[in-house]
Amino acid sequence: MPPKSVWRLSAQNLSRVYQCGSGRVKALDDVSLDINKGEFIAVTGRSGSGKTTLINMLAGLDRASEGTIQTADGTKINKLDEEELARWRGRNVGIVFQFYQLLPSLTVLENTLLPMDLCGVHPKVGRRDHAMSLLNDLGINEHASKLPRDLSGGQQQRAAIARALVNDPDVVFADEPTGNLDSTTAMAVMELFAAQAAKGKAVIMVTHDLDLAPYFSRIITLGDGRIVAEKAKAA
Amino acid sequence: MTLPPRWIKLYRDFQAQGDRLAPVVLAMIFGQVCVIAITGSYATLTRDISRAYTQTKPASGILDIGAVDNALVDRVRAMEDVKDAEALTIIHTRTRKPNGSFGRGLLFVSRSPENQRIGRQQVEQTFPVDGPSVRLERRSVAVAETEIGGSVTFDLPDIGFTDLAVAGTVFDPALAPADQEQAIYAYMDTDTWFALGGGPLEMLEVRVAGDVTDQQHVDTTLTRVAQQLRETGSTVHLVRIPQAETHPHQNQMTTVLMFFLGFGTIAFLLSAFLISVSIEGLMVQQIRQIGVMKAIGARASQIRMLYLIGVALLGLAALVVALPVGQQIGALLSKVVSSLLNFDLTTTTPPVSLLIFWITTGMAVPVLFALRPLTRAANLPVIAAINDQGINAPRPLPKFIARLTGSGVGRLAVDGLNRNVARSLLIIGLLASAGAVTLTARNVSASFETSITIAAEERKHDLDVRLTVPVDRAAALKIARELGAELRDLPLVLEAAPARDDGLAVVRTYPDGGHGALTVLALENFASLAHLVPLVGHLDAGPMTGIILNQSAHRLLGNPVVGDEVSLSLDGKLLLLPLTAVVREYMSPARAYVAAADLKDQVGFEGTNSLRFVAPGGNHYLTDIEMRLELLGSGVKSTFDENQMAEAVSGHINIFIVILTSLGIMIAVVGFAGLTAAQGISVTERRREFGVIRAIGARRGQILSMLLCEGLSYWFVALVLAVLLSMPLSLLIDGLIGRMTFGMPLPFTLDGLAFLLWAGVSLAGTLLASTPPGIAAVRASVTTSLAHQ
């Protein structure tokens, strides 16, 4: 089992080609970037610009056609086999989806406990307390025993964030996590992510919403699969 | 202690999908019940039929000597390789039932039937009676239409009809069941026999020493004993050697059990495939969630294990139901078969090894068959799994079908079938198999009925009266003339055996004289055979020459070709004639037809001992016949009418028909359960699609019609396939049963009524299986359907 890496993610010359009915489509074309602890990065761009493809590869959900993704300890993510990659994701990465993707048959608490159960990161005895503490931090502890269908969109997204954070990952990837939320709830979610970044985690978020720009430490804009602009917040 | 969340998820998912899992579990239960019932009864029956027969210490052979005294018995006991010997007489005679009708009787006379050293019977019931008495084999009581303490009337040679009190019953597992053979088996001691005026015992039962199961050793020893007896002045008329230590119906039972195993395996495999397809359907709904679990760190192996254990638990749940049910059915099956073949079961408790086999297969087989769909779902790349839309688009239809079905409900229904071709094929396969087996059972039954009809038509006589002593043919004709009765034939019927170099007549028959017997019928001319269908050679209209064999005799004598010399031994005398033809005779034991003149020339026997009357219900002649025969110094030995013949043969064949029909029903249940499961899964997969169709204007009735249309498409294709499959299957089983029973296939017959019945039943089953999922599909609102994940 690979050891938990010291966090820094470095992507070099990433490309992703899909084979479609109409031929080859290059979704990502020679993208290189580094992600460091405490960064809150936005990935923006038009539909089809390669945003989701990029974070899927950085999160180890998809494999690059070319290029490498490497952690600070030298682990080459794209060289891991499926089982090792799953372990790496479970221990190092938190993922938040646009449609929350909570498991419908599990309660909020059980959804939160699931990554610990799958990855065995925390001792069994303390898992429940740890999850409840996280839910408390996110303000949804009173909904712990509810099923996702009984929650609002914002509450579901908080539960999804709790699930993403429960294994204490170094980086959180979020694919348009506010896309389905009203503006007030969206702001609350952004505050949560910002707080995680402030705690030293890297947060990479795909978004279309430029109103959220003040939250980000860096904004990467993609166009036709390439980085067309990269803007860091002034220190 | 709380369950880890992934197990909670599995539990709740299974709970939520109860309606779709129920048919899967039902399929597992049926598959397991099939295996448990069939293997359980197989183990019980094969163990106990052999045990029941061998514990009677059956005779390795019976020598027909004519007169056996104690000194001869002692001499044989002292011979090499002889374990034991006992004297007995087996009298084939007729019985008179309380209603005056006649039946077939076998009277076994021995020194002390209760204390036999060979061919032991088990005394079951005893009743104190006065006067001459017999014990009846337990299954003969009903055939004799009497009761314990009552009486039976046997026509004893040189004594006449004698009322014998029924002093009790014995169980003789060495004999074929009395009701199957339509015979009354009775046991009498020599004291009673001699007191009645009976002559000396005529036969010698011999049990060989050494390996009694070694047929060659048994044959060699018994023929050596017979030779030695001849050398010391005894006349050995016939040596009867049955199959070594094998019950007369053991082969019949083995064939039945092979049918069981064959069809049970088919039912089990079909249910296992159904599990595979159903699990695949269930996994379709889990794929996105599997993608999410993998995204948050679950390994494919963890997911695979999670669901495999889930399936194993479903298998276990099915086993909890199937084990007692299967065992009960197996025990029932064993009891039915053992009762049909007249032997008792020691226990129906399965051996531990079998129990382990059931538990292992009950859990492992579903897991094995679920492995492929589970592995496929678990190994799907994360992104593909998360973006999964639930169903694949149907494959493009061939142009002519697309044109034929148009773009309405019919087209959507055909698309539905085409969406998961493997599943559709499986359901069609299940229903077609069920139909094929059921139709085959009915076709075989119809073939059997046809063979009885053909046999009755070709027999050309209604009543066969066998005489105790042959009489002159002219005298027999005179009797018939005086009675105004029409005589079809007057053959001389003799028991024969294939001739051997040593001059002995050895036949492979059981003590009841049946099961392997060969008879020679000497006829004045072959005109009475003209209606028979020749299978080999031809029947000349001219004077009789040579020997004509029916198919059973042809096989028994080693399939000689036309022109070959056939040599038979009749009471130690050789009859040698060229084979003229082989004729077809349904429902008939092995028979050889020769000219009366040839028989007289070569062997010296003449006259007739079999009066074959054309007289439906002709038993009313019998009293007059008897009176006239008495004047000729003869009597009636036995009578055999059409009903007795049909009942005797039915007893052998009905068991196959019942089993095939039951298997058809069993597979049909699995098929309809499969159809319900498949339709349920199909509806779930397409719920969003239904929402879209309804959103653009389709009415609920149209969706329901579409689903019913899908079910009907399954039904139609399966029905056509069932008919097509049932034909070769019927031919195969007609051949198997026919060859086993009388040496040639049953005449292939299609049962049209069975087709209509099956079409109706399967249509009703299809509609019943398709309606609940259809109603479930249209009950949900459009928005719910559209939001379905």
Image (cartoon, coloured by chain):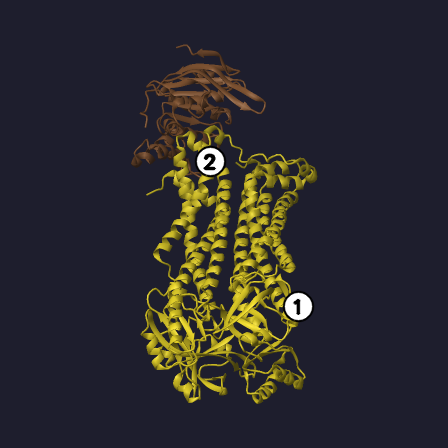
Q: Quadrant of residue B787?
A: top right
Residue B297 x %, y %: 39, 30
Relative height, residue B327 to residue A204 (above, below): below
Give the residue displayed 45% in from the left and 21% down from the top: A64
Q: Chain letter for yellow?
A: B
User: Can you name the residue that lies furthest to the top here?
Assistant: A234
Relative depth, front residue between B364 and B728: B728
Q: Chain of mark 1?
A: B
- Mark 1 in CB contact with mark 2 (< 8 angstroms): no
Relative depth, front residue between B457 and A215: B457
In the picture of the structure, the residue carrying the numbered disc 1 is B531
Numbered label attached to residue B376: 2
Q: Chain of mark 2?
A: B
Residue B516 appears in view: yes
Identify which amino acid the numbered label 1 is placed on. His
Residue A206 x %, y %: 47, 21
Residue B661 x %, y %: 55, 59
Q: Secondary structure at mark 1?
A: loop
Mark closer to the chain start, 1 or 2: 2
Q: Quadrant of residue B440?
A: bottom right
